[in-house]
Amino acid sequence: MFARRINRRTALASSLGMSVVFHGCAMIGFWTPQQPPPSDPNWPAPDRPAKLDLDDVRDDLLALHNKHRAVEKLPALAVSLRLQAAAQAHAVEMAERRKMTHAGADGSTVLERVQDQGYRLRRCGENIAYGHYTPEHVMRGWLDSRPHRKNILGSFTQIGIGYATAKNGTPYWCVNFGLPARPR
């Protein structure tokens, strides 16, 4: 009986551990083209590495953000060049380091990075990802993650989009959201 209880506990703990691992992967939005796409028919066709134009990426991601906000009757996000500069610098840094993280190489936070660009704010947020090769795939990953979706559909009014590719071809994505400070 004792051995069977341990085996059940071990099996339960093991299965819980695996669900946490898979859930964690979904939370960071990582999906590689070697994996089959989810069975959801709304998921875009599997993506492949391609050289994407930064302006096209930004236009596509802005349109996708605003499309999903419109469905929820939320106002469109406007581009902030200061948020964009912070997002682009962070995407480039992640690609150079080949490390997806909300912390900058110097330990900076998203708040510090957007303030360093001169952005005056009441609030800010950040979505990051890597390994998705199209704006549609990265957006779907974020929408399937509650914290990322909350940023996309939150009370932010401005956005900045960054995208960079590591030397090995892995794309890194950074989107900064902001609610600017009230005029004095």
Image (tube, helix red, strand yellow):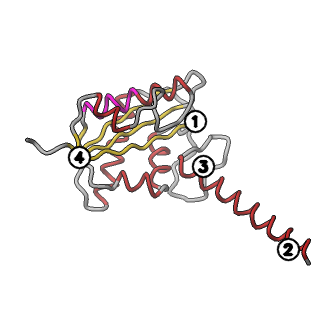
Q: Residue at x 31, y 36 (%)?
A: 160
| Side of 29 relative to 12 (left or right) | left
Q: Which labelled disc corresponds to residue 122?
A: 4
Q: Which residue is mark 1?
A: 48
Q: Which labelled disc corresponds to residue 120?
A: none
First of labels 4, 2 by sequence position:
2
Mark 3 and mark 1: Cα distance apart in space:
19 Å
- Disc 2 packing (10 Å; few <14; some 14–19; many ≥20): few
Q: Which residue is mark 2?
A: 5
- Between 72 and 104, the residue placed more toward the observer is 104
Q: Is residue 23 above or below residue 1?
A: above
Residue 58 falls inside the magenta stretch:
no
First of labels 3, 2 by sequence position:
2
In the image, farthest residue toward the bottom: 1
Res 175 quadrant in image: top left
Instruction: Look at the image and give the residue range highlighted in magenta.
Output: 81-89
Q: Is residue 55 above or below residue 5?
A: above
Q: Is residue 174 above or below residue 42?
A: above
- Say what amino acid the circle numbered 4 marks: Arg
